[in-house]
Amino acid sequence: MTRRREKAAAPVGTRRAAREFAFRVLFEADRGDLPMQSVFNRAENAMRAGDDTFPVLSEEALVFAQQLVSGISAARPDIDATLRRTIRGWSFDQMAQTDLNILRLATFEMTGTTEPHPPIIESAVRIARKFGGDDSGRFVNGVLAGLSRALPRPETPAAPAPQREVFEQTPEPDASEPDAPHPAAPRTPGEPE
């Protein structure tokens, strides 16, 4: 077996590959007006049977792809409403279905998970460049950057205040005893305490 085939046969465990898998399921379900879960099951079976249309995902990546598909199915009306408020000058009918489904996928992750926005946007742009038109990457990036700015930032726990070293303060010598040594001053041997 050649190195190229060995590399292709190894399961891919990246979130980006899982997002691409979920995008393909979403796109096919949307184009064929089919239930997303049945399209996901068919795609998973094709992947396991060796269909090279889909990269072979690790179990962890496949679980993540399933979470994305299930989440999008459940939140589709909210996702579409969010996109309608975010996208200016375009209706869903005017947009390429590729771009719209990539935006749906990324919008679900940005609004429905705690995943940081930059890797979501980066993955969406890469998928748009791979499957979309010449300007798809730029369009997807612009929409998602605007959405990211409009979304409230997730509450992050406040960082604990830096610990300061507490030094024991030595009392100043009593002014009434001018000859008394400073408490921190070294004593000479035989000197009374």
Image: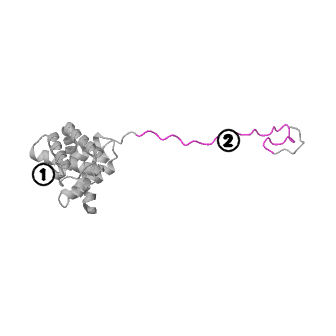
Mark number displayed over residue 167: 2
Residue at screen point 11% across, 49% down = 93
Residue 69 x/y as whole percent? 21, 42
User: Quick one: label 2, few (<14), some, or many (20+) residues within 10 Å?
Assistant: few
**Quadrant of the image for the C terminus?**
top right
- The amino acid marked with disc number 2 is Phe
Residue 18 x/y as whole percent? 26, 48
Residue at screen point 20% across, 41% down = 81
Q: Is residue 3 above or below residue 72?
A: below
Question: 167 or 64, which lies in front?
Answer: 64
The question of residue 161 being in magenta is answered with yes
Question: 14 or 135, which lies in front?
Answer: 14
Residue 128 x/y as whole percent? 22, 55
Would you say the magenta stretch is mainly helix, strand or loop?
Answer: loop
Mark number displayed over residue 129: none
User: Quick one: label 1, few (<14), some, or many (20+) residues within 10 Å?
Assistant: few
Residue at screen point 46% across, 39% down = 158
Mark number displayed over residue 94: 1
The question of residue 64 being in magenta is answered with no
Question: 151 or 24, which lies in front?
Answer: 24
Is residue 170 visible in the rendered image? The answer is: yes
- Which stretch is magenta? 156-185
Front: mark 1 or 2: 2
**Scheme of image coloration:** one colour
- The amino acid marked with disc number 1 is Gln
